[in-house]
Amino acid sequence: MSSSVTATDRRRSGQAGPATPIRATWTSTYLRTAAALDCFCSLLAGLIALEFRFAVQGDVPAGYVALTAALPALWLASVTLAGGYDPRFIGVGSDEFRRVLNVAVSLTAGAAVVAYAAKFDLARGYVLVALPSAVALDLTARYRLRKWLHRRRRSGHYMRRTVAVGHAGAVSDLVAMLRRDSHHGLSVVAVCVADALHQDEVGAVPICGNLDSVASVVSRFQADTVAILACPEMNGTRLRELAWDLEKTGTEMCVASALLDVAGPRTTIRPVAGLPLLHVDHAELAGAKQVIKAMFDRVSAGLALAVLAPVFAMIAVAIWMTDHGPVFFRQIRVGKDGEPFTVWKFRTMVVDAEARKTELLMRNDADGTLFKMRRDPRVTRTGAWLRRRSLDELPQLFNVLVGNMSLVGPRPALPMEVAAYRHHMRRRLVVKPGITGLWQINGRSDLPWDEAERLDLRYVENWSLALDLQILWKTVSAVVHCSGAY
């Protein structure tokens, strides 16, 4: 491969010059910044605890001043031991935040044990303020730092130069996904494929060799990551030899499982007869956790309806004043186990919207069975405002309260969609549909149809209470930024 191709590739990835030194520089800078924020947040939390616990007394014991001064070092050491500065967790996933939470639990337990063993009367008020405050401040600081990194990555900076290995079709899908979700930080600069006969590139990325030339391509493009997709030709022997070659240059190797969209909590690697077998647990679709989810849904929906009652009244008046038509829009959707139910929304279109739909079918912007238009002439001015802010979905809280829907789940499907489902898509009907879900926080109407299907299935396969809370948190950001809402 000529030097001109390498230069072009570097421009595509948003970087200049050798990748490994650049990555080492920005990674170390990012981690140093995270460590500085950790120290600052823990010190601030200690000062808040001093003020809260001893402000009334007016005299702060010297021992607690020393403890507050030492808290940043204790916090830093604990986060380090918990793996909070592992570069693998930079920018994506919940592992970084989970480790900070683990630190707080460990320090609380450690403080209790040390105080008991040393017979030291540690003020509970200090501990109960200092450690939760440190967690809240640190998680907020790390979240803002991550969002800064995501913005930089959208501009093409701080990316990991990646060589993708596998079959051309799978590699093409990976390239498209990583370009769409740049926050993952992987920029495919070259590919090595097993089945390219007359192709020069895959997804506008040059094909630079086959499965036997991965190490040389990594060296040529100065990549720092190799992503190996499911590929029968890349057997155990080849993988082992490639790992040895990459070990010499410190290049990371990631191997994708052929099992799609199954997250870490369901998978465990267990050695059997010397083979590292990937054990996959069944999805948690019944049992105590589902009961807790149902209780959480109904209590949250009831509280939300009580708090938002004034908002409901104002929206109802605004809709009625638009054309004196009905306030609510009702439609049959398909719920859990294929049972139909009536979904409620605030009406955002003219009264005869369904009758006028046939006139607009040729202008459909969606690529699936749904009908979507970015500038649908049937949407009223009030309706457009409600849609941009997702306020038209609020009446679905009634559906959650009566048990037809959940706060989080797959998008409630129309009967015509379900009738056109392929066999594997019926899997999404084993859980209740949701007001929000992975489809909403990943682009909503801007998503391709097959990607929306994949996200629905991913939710079903990986459901957990923690995932629901994460989706609810991200939904707030998606609503505020009007992501994919029209």
Image: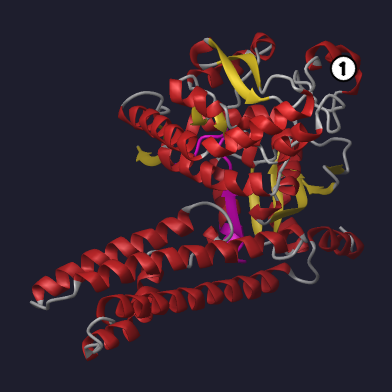
Callout 1: few (<14), some (14-19), or many (20+) C-alpha neighbours within 10 Å? few
How far across and how far down the image is residue 310, in percent? 55, 38
The residue at 33%/68% (across/down) is 131
Q: How is the image coloured?
A: secondary structure
The residue at 23%/89% (across/down) is 59
Mark yes or no: residue 387 visible: yes
Q: Is residue 278 above or below residue 376?
A: below
Among the 4 quarters of the image, the one containing residue 146: bottom right
Mark yes or no: residue 84 visible: no
Whether the magenta-drawn stretch holds residue 325 is answered as no
Depth check, front residue: 292 or 30? 292
Quadrant including the N terminus: bottom right
Q: Which residues are magenta?
A: 244-264
Tag 1: residue type? Leu
Left or right for 401, reference 359: left
The residue at 54%/24% (across/down) is 433
Depth check, front residue: 26 or 480? 480
Reading the image, the residue beneath label 1 is 361
Q: Secondary structure at mark 1?
A: helix
The residue at 72%/68% (across/down) is 19
Whether the magenta-drawn stretch holds residue 257 is answered as yes
How far across and how far down the image is residue 113, in percent? 15, 68
